[in-house]
Amino acid sequence: MSGSSDAPEVEPGAASVEPGRSVHLLSEMLRVRRFEERCVELYSHQAIRGFLHLAIGEEACCVGVMQALDPEDAVVATYREHGHALARGISMRAALAELEGRVEGCSRGRGGSMHLFDAATRFFGGNAIVAGGLPLAVGLALADHLSGRHRVTACFFGDGAVAEGEFHEAMNLAALWHLPVLFCCENNLYAMGTALEFTESETDLSLKAASYRMASWHVDGMDVLAVSEAAREAADAVRAGGGPHFLEMRTYRFRSHSMYDPDRYRDKAEIDRWRSRDPIDQLRVQLVARGVLTDADVERMESAIADEVLDAVDFAAGGTDEPVADLGRFVTSTPGGAT
Amino acid sequence: MSTITYREALREAIREALIADERVFVMGEDVGHYGGSYAVTLGLLEEFGPERIRDTPLSESGFVGAGIGAALGGMRPIVEVMTVNFSLLALDQIMNNAASLLYMSGGQFNVPLVIRMATGAGRQVAAQHSHSLEGWYAHIPGLRVLAPATLDDARAMLAPALDDPDPVLIFEHAMLYGTEGELTDDAHTRDITSAAIRRRGEDVTIVAYGGTLRVALGAAEVLAREGVDAEVVDLRSLRPLDTSTILTAVSRTHRAVVVDEGWRSGSLSAEVASRITEGVFYDLDAPVARVCGAEVPMPYAKHLEDAAMPQVADVVAAVHALGA
């Protein structure tokens, strides 16, 4: 982790993380990866429709940050949020049922891939307007501040969001009011298909946050141990009243922006270079080399995850369609409300 | 009984809400130290302090979104936006989040938020401070849209709006803030769904709301001197529309004029006229007439601004044209 402003220097790496936690991180990343791989298959079978944005390659970000949160904390995510939902504790069953439009889905089939919500884990979506979730996170944190609660609101967004006015408005409000927000920027270098260098006059995103007098750090988003350490430290500081923190995670999505994207804007060598830094492979190799895990342990882990995925696939396939008569339900809280 | 102004009635309602419920706070541009751009919140900072009377930067999208987030977090925010034209900067948050979150989340996350803003022309502040865009908001499922046209409603509507589990937008016509009079028992109504009959009549129904109510009542007075007895319906709620009250009135008077300061094309007046035609077509003795704002960006010059707004004479002429 490097500090752009007044960030403390922390030595990341495996040595500082106890083995059990490392294994958990690997397992969580694998859950996200295998889930999304299955989503691709289900998409090709047309069980999943609409937009499907995959975060394959970016798993270290959502998994790493989520370790730092407590159950009463809040999460605001983007439309590329399957991993965040799973890592936060939404079941694969509820997530996949949502992707298949079933009433058993975590948003009753009203949201789909881009709008996963869950009150039980305080997961506030699934926001598909780029940067639209940042003001919400500020407000959630404001509610905690006004109520005297020591909670953290973790707000995820991509590098594309920093070009939006809402990003700057939210940064300013959070810093001005010293609110407990952990801003988590997943910088995968491309806003859909346009590289950061073509859209930003300053491509060091943590500098932008620092300009709002906010503690601002960047971290290797392909190293889950580094991410989880940095997130833990940042979340602890936020919770202790240190004001908002900005954590930029430099990462990469291995697949295209969505299932519709032909990916003409990236060259293969670049993709291969990042693939060689696959966060899952890196950690697995490291843990096996250190003797924390054996190959057989990894196989057992894979097998358990495969079972979980299969169970979710069956659950979603056997799910029910919400009756069309309920189309107008939840437009307002009370039936016959302001419609 | 002492008199009260529209802005004082609004302020009393806000004060009462702040005293009654710790979760209520006010947030917006110039609501605190300045006292509110229309002086609605004057004195509240001194009484309730800066945590609950929260000045914001000029970040409409940011602070409206923060209001939504605070509502999700259990608070009951009253967000003030300076004028409806500025609210367009927050339209993303109002529509894509406030109005949609409950539905997108399958009923899990409601947004108990009140957003107040000034609307309408008449102060010669030209084309970026004067429009009547409440009809746009009334287009959006998931929002409740209110237009207090009277002192009583200015006093009454906030409390039930804050009790609503879903987002409520309150549009205050800028020309009404200084109006003065006495409150009646209606100042304590909890009703934010019904239209109100402001004048009983037999010959024609004039439908109005917000700033055009006084135009409609003025026209009714002129018509009365001519022997034409006009019924005046104040919509009060623009979404949902109290269609039943409108249709009952029109089916009795057989003629209808809809007055709306908003632009005619694709307007709230079009919706009201359409519902009348759908609902009581065979009771009509004449086509439904509309008196709307001129389809121009609001001009500055006084005579042009007047010409762009529905006037008493326009409404009287419209009624005459119906053969009433």
Image (tube, helix red, strand yellow):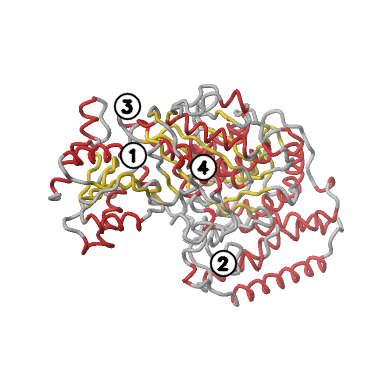
Say which residue appears at 25% left-offset and 29% top-offset: B299
The residue where tag 4 is placed is B114
Query: Is residue B304 in sight in this rendering?
Result: yes
Residues behind callouts 4 and 2 on a single chain: no
Answer few, some or many: residues within 10 Å of disc 3's Cα (few below 14, many 20 plus, some between 14 and 19): few
CA gap between label 4 and label 2 equals 42 Å
Q: Which element is circle 1 on?
A: loop
Q: Secondary structure at mark 3?
A: loop
Q: Secondary structure at mark 2?
A: helix
Q: Quadrant of residue A279?
A: bottom right
For disc 1, the chain is: B
Q: Which mark is residue A40?
A: 2
**Disc on the earlier residue, 3 or 1:** 3
The image's mark for residue B132 is 1
Q: Amino acid at mark 4?
A: Val
Q: Earlier in the sequence, mark 4 or mark 3?
A: 4
Task: Pinpoint the chain carrying mark 3.
Answer: B
Front position in the image: B222 or B35: B222
Which class describes the residues within 10 Å of circle 2: few (<14), some (14-19), or many (20+)?
some
Say what amino acid the circle numbered 3 marks: Arg
Instruction: Name the mark on residue B123.
Output: 3
Residue at point 20% right, 33% down? B307
**Alpha-carbon span between mark 1 and mark 4:** 19 Å
Q: Is residue B295 visible?
A: no
Residue B186 percent coordinates (x, y): 45, 42
Q: Callout 2, which amino acid?
A: Val
Could you tell me which secondary element the residue under label 4 belongs to?
strand
| Mark 1 and mark 4 on one chain | yes
**Amino acid tagged 1:** Ser
Near mark 4 (Cα within 10 A), the count class, few <14, some 14-19 or many ≥20, is many
